[in-house]
């Protein structure tokens, strides 16, 4: 192919924008202000035109009239051009104004980076955005005079395939561009990004995952309290309730507690009945005690139940994997008789009664302090600890992940992955 | 964290704490060692004659700080970050380097102030300054964000020492009142110079940069703008009231008794002793210590915010060293250099401070221009951009303050300072 030689030449946006606009004969017509792209649907978005300043007016230069884009200039095909005033059309992004110098999401590292330059390559006649330069070298190239800047070669840049720019600040776009690449991230990584971004950028990330309500709920579970409050306070009560409905009861309670007091009851009233009841129960406890930490989602059966009945119950129940890790047995008076890890129930002989499989387990009172909870779980090597009321009835279980979250020094809990990257 | 959420009362306290927050810290950090020295000089040399100016300066300060706070709340971005995004990397680098130099210089003067304050208790600066540096560093880097903020706010309490010292000095209140309302203009160079210096020390670039970044780190949003506006206005008013009381205190004593020159803040404290009793001196020393410590903590943090925002690095006082190495590194280096230079004998501190004034004088018009341009930007600020009347007021403030700042720059460079 004739263009092969050209594909290796990488153009820096910072050299193109600010350069000359010249006609076919090389006569100067004006100044190149920006390049236009559309982001949807293309892995490497092609440039669809340029914006130039000609005689003090911002004019649109369609791709069809551009002969070549090069370092410091854009050359037209013909001697003259139509002076068509530039107006943004929906979905159009201006590379310099909207992306350069701003934060973009590096999907591979799940972190925010700043676009020090944008790299373009001519592939089969189209100029495509291929990457973002985040290196110090890219920044230096733009600070020193142009004549020296040419000597600084292009360093490593991030492949555009793993870059997702923010478009919420672009007037003609306003959250309408989907961010499909975000789906490659876990809820925890998305939450880290939301926390590191500005409020508006955070809104954009959340809006992008909204089409997947499960993911959105997971994201909220992972957010820190301050940020949960920040992003939930603008929503209506039914919207918040819909979000909570997809969360584990204890996480839902955490979020409810972030709401202003006068909004809590109306929101809880909109929850599905079972979840609503659980949330109300949990709200009665001090959040720093076993009662506040516990989840009401656990599996307990009467001691008379056989191994098969227990396993059938595990299969049918919707209790999460953490909550189902232990099976509890009750006495005829609904008091806790004992518990056994699910693995032991599976390994027990056919027909064995639950009462024979379980053994006595250490328990916590609802008002046990965090330290006591952590101590008990450490001493007995428990990943799950039952919380028992005064009458011996099983109220809920505390799982190790909820305790760890509070016991770890605050600094440790922050984004490992955001900082761990390159 | 779960335990914070339990009680409504605690939540309200936290809310009140945030109202007491960044505006107060920023404004009071403006009343630092250099500020106190300037106000004391003003009072000693011209009595109450420059008091009328404090009214104008207060209005300007409120206007400027309000814009910065509003931008932080609406955009969720720091000032340096917005400069980078809207004006490109060259302006961004210019302001970053100037802020770094200016803040380093002011930081040195704060540690000189700490040494002077504890010098009144006969502690040599070689002992007091290193200890203070370690305390400040631990507070900023190892303390939690909430603790750091509470301590910063608590550190402003000694400022009440100034009104008390002023009252103990028994000024003629009718003369004070008259001086506030009726401008007394002297047409001599020193008067003009003090006028300009006072404006320069009260409205300093780091105050806008710190305020905006701190508003962002607190996670305030557009809905917090009215509350934050109130906080900024009352904080600026409070800080300038304190400054006015320094002028009144020195005006009622030094000026009346003919001691017309004050070469540094400690002089001002010592000079109060024979007239207002030992009590006044102790209070003056506490106030100076608190002010210097507060600013010594705020300045490195501001520089770190600016550098992180410009280069897009991890930032925030809530971050640990391992998470934000550059952020913490900048803070550490600034505190270390500030403390070391302040105790090395033979370092020309006065010359350094003059240099600081030059850098600040060059930086302020640029910062203010950016603040003004950004806060009236429709695309950026939407419905929260400057209103028409406010915008004119803001433009006037920016032009007047910049003119004064450039005047000071010219005077300093021509060697009259």
Image (spheres, grey):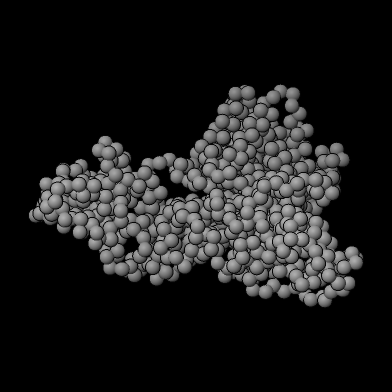
- Quadrant of the image occupied by residue A223: bottom left
Residue B244 in percent (x, y) is at 66, 47
Q: Is residue A85 visible?
A: yes
State whether residue A225 is above or below residue B147: below
The residue drawn where x is 84% and y is 45% is: B410
The residue drawn where x is 68% and y is 34% is: B108
Q: Is residue B381 visible?
A: no
State whether residue B118 is above or below residue A42: above
- Quadrant of the image occupied by residue B30: top right
Q: Quadrant of the C terminus of chain A?
A: top right
Picture mark count: 0
State whether residue A97 is above or below residue A343: below
Residue A67 in percent (x, y) is at 81, 67
The residue drawn where x is 14% and y is 51% is: A350
Q: Quadrant of the N terminus of chain A?
A: bottom right
Choose between A302 and B90: the one closer to the eye: A302
Residue B411 in percent (x, y) is at 84, 43
Q: Is residue A396 left or right of residue B390?
A: left
Q: Is residue A343 left or right of residue B101?
A: left
State whether residue B225 is above or below residue B329: below
The residue drawn where x is 77% and y is 38% is: B355
Residue B224 in percent (x, y) is at 53, 60
């Amino acid at each position: 192919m004739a263009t092969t030689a050209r594909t290796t030449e990488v153009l820096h946006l910072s050299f193109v924008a600010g350069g000359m606009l010249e006609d076919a004969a090389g006569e100067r017509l004006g100044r190149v202000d920006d390049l236009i792209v559309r982001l949807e649907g293309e892995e490497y978005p092609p440039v669809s035109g340029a914006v130039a300043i000609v005689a003090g007016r911002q004019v649109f230069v369609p791709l069809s009239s551009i002969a070549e884009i090069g370092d410091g200039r854009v050359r037209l095909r013909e001697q003259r051009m139509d002076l068509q005033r530039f107006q943004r059309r929906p979905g159009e992004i201006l590379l310099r104004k909207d992306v350069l110098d701003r934060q973009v999401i590096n999907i591979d590292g799940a972190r925010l980076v700043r676009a020090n330059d944008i790299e373009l390559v001519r592939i089969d006649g189209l100029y495509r955005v291929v990457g973002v330069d985040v290196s110090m070298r890219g920044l230096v190239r733009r600070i020193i005079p142009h004549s020296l800047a040419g000597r600084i070669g292009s360093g490593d840049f991030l492949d555009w395939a793993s870059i997702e720019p923010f478009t919420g600040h672009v007037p003609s776009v306003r959250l309408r561009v989907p961010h499909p690449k975000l789906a490659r991230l876990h809820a925890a990584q998305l939450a880290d990004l939301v926390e590191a971004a500005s409020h508006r950028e955070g809104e954009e990330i959340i809006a992008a995952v909204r089409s997947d309500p499960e993911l959105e709920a997971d994201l909220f579970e992972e957010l820190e309290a301050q940020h949960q409050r920040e992003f939930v306070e603008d929503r209506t009560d039914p919207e918040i309730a819909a979000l909570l409905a997809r969360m584990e009861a204890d996480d839902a309670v955490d979020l409810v507690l972030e709401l202003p007091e006068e909004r809590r009851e109306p929101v809880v009233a909109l929850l599905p009945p079972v979840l609503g009841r659980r949330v109300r129960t949990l709200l009665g406890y001090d959040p720093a005690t076993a009662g506040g930490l516990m989840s009401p989602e656990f599996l307990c059966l009467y001691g008379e139940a056989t191994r098969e009945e227990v396993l059938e119950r595990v299969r049918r129940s919707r209790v999460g994997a953490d909550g189902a890790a232990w099976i509890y047995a009750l006495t005829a008076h609904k008091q806790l008789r004992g518990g056994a890890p699910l693995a032991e129930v599976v390994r027990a002989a056919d027909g064995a009664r639950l009462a024979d499989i379980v053994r006595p387990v250490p328990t916590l009172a609802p008002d046990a302090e965090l330290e006591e909870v952590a101590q008990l779980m450490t001493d007995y090597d428990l990943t799950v600890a039952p919380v028992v009321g005064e009458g011996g009835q099983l109220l809920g279980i505390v799982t190790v992940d909820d305790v760890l979250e509070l016991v770890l020094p605050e600094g440790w809990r922050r984004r490992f992955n955001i900082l761990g990257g390159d | 964290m779960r335990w914070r959420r339990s009680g409504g009362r605690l939540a309200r306290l936290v809310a009140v704490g945030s109202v007491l927050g960044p505006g107060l810290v920023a404004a009071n950090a403006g009343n630092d060692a250099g500020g106190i020295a300037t106000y004391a000089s003003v009072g000693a040399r011209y009595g109450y004659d420059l008091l009328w100016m404090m009214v104008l300066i207060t209005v300007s300060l409120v206007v400027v700080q309000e814009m910065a706070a509003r931008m932080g709340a609406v955009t969720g971005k720091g000032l340096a970050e917005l400069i980078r995004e809207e004006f490109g990397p060259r302006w961004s680098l210019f302001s970053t380097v100037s802020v770094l130099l200016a803040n380093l210089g002011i930081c040195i003067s704060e540690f000189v102030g700490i040494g002077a304050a504890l010098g009144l208790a006969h502690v040599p600066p070689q002992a007091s300054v290193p200890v203070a540096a370690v305390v400040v560093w631990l507070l900023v880097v190892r303390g939690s964000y909430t603790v750091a903020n509470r301590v910063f706010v608590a550190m402003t309490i000694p400022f009440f020492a100034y009104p008390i010292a002023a009252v103990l000095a028994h000024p003629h209140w009718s003369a004070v009142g008259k001086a506030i309302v009726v401008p007394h203009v002297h047409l001599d160079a020193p008067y003009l110079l003090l006028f300009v210096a006072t404006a320069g020390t009260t409205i300093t670039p780091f105050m806008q940069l710190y305020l905006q970044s701190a508003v962002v780190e607190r996670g305030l949003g557009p809905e917090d703008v009215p509350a934050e506006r109130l906080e900024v206005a009352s904080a600026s008013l409070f800080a300038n009231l304190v400054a006015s009381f320094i002028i009144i205190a020195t005006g009622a004593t030094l000026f009346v008794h003919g001691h017309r020159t004050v070469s540094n803040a400690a002089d001002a404290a010592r000079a109060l002793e024979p007239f207002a009793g030992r009590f006044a001196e102790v209070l003056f020393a506490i106030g100076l210590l608190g002010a210097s410590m507060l600013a010594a903590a705020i300045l490195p943090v501001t520089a770190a915010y600016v550098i992180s925002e410009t280069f897009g690095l991890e930032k925030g006082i809530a971050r640990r060293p391992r998470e934000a190495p550059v952020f913490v590194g900048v803070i550490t280096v600034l505190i270390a250099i500030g403390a070391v230079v302040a105790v090395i004998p033979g370092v020309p501190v006065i010359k350094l401070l003059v240099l600081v004034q030059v850098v600040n004088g060059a930086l302020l018009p640029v910062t203010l221009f950016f603040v003004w341009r950004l806060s009236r930007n429709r695309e950026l600020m939407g419905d929260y951009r400057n209103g028409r009347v406010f915008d004119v007021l803001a433009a006037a403030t920016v032009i007047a303050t910049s003119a004064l700042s450039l005047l000071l720059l010219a005077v300093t460079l021509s060697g009259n300072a």
